[in-house]
Image (spheres, rainbow, N blue to C red):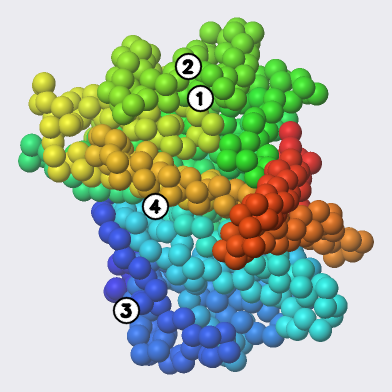
Amino acid sequence: MAAAAAAAAAAAAYANLKLLSTEHFKIEDRDLSDESPLPDSSDKVAKEQIGSSVKYEGYTKAEYGLVYENPFQKHVTPEKFYVEACDDGADDVLAIDRVSTEVTLTVKKDVPPSAVTRPIYGILGTIRLVAGTYLIVITKKKKVGEIFSHAIWKATDFDILSYKKTMLHLTDIQLQDNKVFLSMLNHVLSVDGFYFSTTYDLTHTLQRLANTSPEFQEMSLLERADPRFVWNGHLLREFAAQPEIHRFATPVMHGFITMHSCSINGKCFDWLLISRRSCFRAGVRYYVRGIDSEGHAANFIETEQIVHYKGSKASFVQTRGSIPFFWSQRPNLKYKPKPQISKSVNHMDGFQRHFDSQIISYGKQMIVNLVNQKGSEKPLEQTFAKMVANMANGMVRYVAFDFHKECSRMRWDRLQILMDQLAEQQDEFSYFLVDSDGKIVTQQEGIFRSNCMDCLDRTNVIQSLLARRSLQAQLQRLGILHVGQRIEEQADFEKIYKNAWADNANACAKQYAGTGALKTDYTRTGKRTQWGLIMDGWNSLIRYYKNNFSDGFRQDAIDLFLGNYSVDEVEPASPLHVQKDWKFLALPIIMVVAFSMCIICLLMAGDTWTETMAYVFFWGSASSGTFAIILYNGKDFVDAPKLVQKEKMD
């Protein structure tokens, strides 16, 4: 009876998805790692038949939540991996041959009793490294909440399983290379922000889902997902080619999701913020800027704010992305490398492709360019404005706002100047609203595309203000806010709102720049603080170190994970082995020795003051001169990507 009830509930939940159900969000935040037995791969989970239930370490499937939470069971033998879907009544088992790598469907009775078993929560896909093919699975998850009765999860731990039973076929160099590639995969998977659902499409906005056909709704999540936001699309390429095994594939997005149950004027509603990070031209701060030949912008993120109240649903969508023409800003040991606009390519082709795709996806475009209008950023602003004018597309409008100049000396109230300038456009774009009967009341007709240099700190501040203005209108239309009331006056909700947007800023910044966001004190409190300035300075120092001395590895890891680089077993020379110029080791040693001698001469004075100063001057000059040479050749001393360099320099 319990099994039948669970199956009926699952069927009802899926039906609700297709109808854009008016069921409410259920907010939860719990880690399932304690609910799932995770033995070492060498241990076999004890199984005991109890009626129709299988017992795992003394707990039934239902007690583990294996029915309701819909995970899988992974069975491992020396010859095959078996993945069993734990839906009630399902008999299908995915069989992966560890020798031929063939993927087929079989049934439960074909799983050998000797197989080592453990629960998993999804299949990320497969990837080929030096040692052969690896299977990547989700082993831990944390519940973010429920949207329209569909559970939303954050993946928190993964396993990378080798098809090969031994590494004896590899040379020492191959073993080392394979270890480096594995560490790259582990690095990507360790970055917070991988989300998934087994019954809900996280890659689409409410408006896109509402405007799809019944045939689209019947597709598997893998087939219908927006490829821009499926971060394991490359890993699932073999699964995508076999529709019969799509149910075993778990599309995963990267970014940020938060859900909150809120109350204003005694009226309870649910509020959701979701940022979807594009996997096209993905990478790290200084190594991936601008666009590629297809028009994909670096650090492109779609952010959707959702309100759900008594069956009615409203959403407001914004985007951010790097300035969409060909430019670079490679690290070179300087605190702020000078941006370089390419002189060898036709910028308009990629620029046009970018906005053509944006108009198809979102409608009218309102560009909000927040870069400095003087100094090294000035040419970027001028070129952007010129290209928008030359494109002469009535669907694309442009506003430039020098954020740092306007808000200098803590004058953050001047952001209202920009908000007033954008107000008419925002009213024209409107927002998406569907009533409790599923009828579309309004649609969002255009989008704000904001950018600064990194599309992080300044961008997030402006996006939070635009989202607040839209939310104000939505809450009043839904009858939650009274006429004349403002969100800022609702202290409890205001705190939730500000913290959520600050958390969103931190998540996006960590994924692109390697540290939390700057200026989050303003997002959290509505004002700039001295402590916020200190924390911005600290984060800036951490960014400087990572951008210069560890981002090459981070970029390689992302390129490997996304399939921008594929490991070739017969490749004559591994790109991991790059010979450094003699300057790389010699000059830092000379500088350190010279600086040390300078300090020693100061501490151990000579016979005369003149003699001491002569030694100090000599060693100080040697140290300073060497440091100047290192800065001049800065690009030779930073940690540069090894796997995909040429493509990232466009």
Work out how far the residue at label 3 is from the one at label 1, CA to CA, in angstroms: 54 Å
Q: Residues within 10 Å of mark 4 (few under 14, many from 20)?
A: many
Q: Position of residue 531 (x, y in %)?
A: 30, 45
Along the horizontal axis of the image, is 120 left or right of 164? Answer: left
Residue behind mark 2: 400
Numbered disc 4: secondary structure: helix
Residue carrying label 1:
371
The three-letter code of the residue at mark 3 reads Glu
The residue at 36%/76% (across/down) is 35
Label 4: which residue?
14
Residue 377 visible in this rendered orientation of the protein: yes
The amino acid at mark 4 is Tyr
Label 2–label 3 contact, CB within 8 A: no
Q: Earlier in the sequence, mark 4 or mark 3?
A: 4
181 sits to left or right of 519: right
Residue on which disc 3 sits? 63
Number of the front mark, 3 or 1: 1
Mark before the other along the chain sequence, 3 or 1: 3
Q: Is residue 209 visible?
A: no
Q: Earlier in the sequence, mark 4 or mark 2?
A: 4
Residue beneath the point at 11% across and 26% down: 485
Q: Nearer the viewer, residue 645 or 17?
A: 645
Q: In the image, what residue type sits under mark 1?
A: Val
Badge 3 density bin: few <14, some 14–19, many ≥20, Cα 10 Å = few
Q: Which of labels 2 and 3 is toward the front?
A: 2
Labels 4, 1: front one? 1
